[in-house]
Image: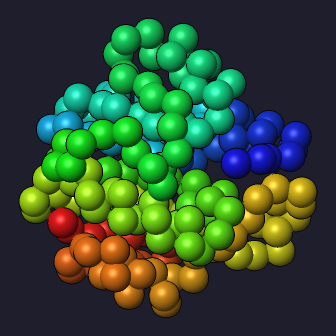
């Protein structure tokens, strides 16, 4: 979804990559089994994709932005199966993945209804017992300033467990730490 120039610069920065790899990713999915078939939704510039690719499993990524998807194909050159598609309309059969993950992208999905469609699609493509996990940012003044002119639909942590359960997941859990939330649910 659209991002302003400042936001694009931040999401490609070494500082952002270091924070994601050292703090957010281990906190969000450090104990999620990533050794099977893993689907990443909304990888953007590929910072999280690189970390996932280095942590085992067969990785597939879905990116809605055509230019970013093309860049990812070049960057990962066959190492990761990159698809240009919408996370709310996934091009995969039911029960295709052991884990579905997404990081700091849910607030770029343009409406709560579309976010719910994404949750339902993640549940549909997961194998029984599979895990849907990830993180997203929490609203703050800094967050709002970075997103001026962007698509920004925050995901309230207090509503997320019920939304995940409504999408067909079981055992939906949400935690908040600092400026982020993490979630986990099973199919």
Measuring from the top left, give residue 91's x and y in whole percent. 37, 39
Whether residue 107 is visible, yes or no, is yes
- Which colour assignment does the render follow? rainbow
How many numbered circles are shown? 0
The residue lying at 40 percent from left, 65 percent from top is 119
The residue lying at 20 percent from left, 68 percent from top is 186
Q: Does residue 45 sit above or below 31 in this rendering?
A: above
Q: Is residue 91 left or right of residue 4?
A: left
Q: Does residue 8 sit above or below 1 in this rendering?
A: above
Q: Is residue 115 left or right of residue 31?
A: right
Instruction: Quadrant for residue 13, please give it.
Output: top right
Measuring from the top left, give residue 26's x and y in whole percent. 37, 52
Q: Nearer the viewer, residue 76 or 21?
A: 76
Measuring from the top left, give residue 108's x and y in whole percent. 66, 57
Measuring from the top left, give residue 82's x and y in whole percent. 44, 25
Instruction: Quadrant for residue 30, please give it.
Output: bottom left
Q: Nearer the viewer, residue 176 or 122?
A: 122
Q: Does residue 183 sit above or below 90 in this rendering?
A: below
The residue lying at 41 percent from left, 81 percent from top is 163
The residue lying at 89 percent from left, 60 percent from top is 148
């Amino acid at each position: 979804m659209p991002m302003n120039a400042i936001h694009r610069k931040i999401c490609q920065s070494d500082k952002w990559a270091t924070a994601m790899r050292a703090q957010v990713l281990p906190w969000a999915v450090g104990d999620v089994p990533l050794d099977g078939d893993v689907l990443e939704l909304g990888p953007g510039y590929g910072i999280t994709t690189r970390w996932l690719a280095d942590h085992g499993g067969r990785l597939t990524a879905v990116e809605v932005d055509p230019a970013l998807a093309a860049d990812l194909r070049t960057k990962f050159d066959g190492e990761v199966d990159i698809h240009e598609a919408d996370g709310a309309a996934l091009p995969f059969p039911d029960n295709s993945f052991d884990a579905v993950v997404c990081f700091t992208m849910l607030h770029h999905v343009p409406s709560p209804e579309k976010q719910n469609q994404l949750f339902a699609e993640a549940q549909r493509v997961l194998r029984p017992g599979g895990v849907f996990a990830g993180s997203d940012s929490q609203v703050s003044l800094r967050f709002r300033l970075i997103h001026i002119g962007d698509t920004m639909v925050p995901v309230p942590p207090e509503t997320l467990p019920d939304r995940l359960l409504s999408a067909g997941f079981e055992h939906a859990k949400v935690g908040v730490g600092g400026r982020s939330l993490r979630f986990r649910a099973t199919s």
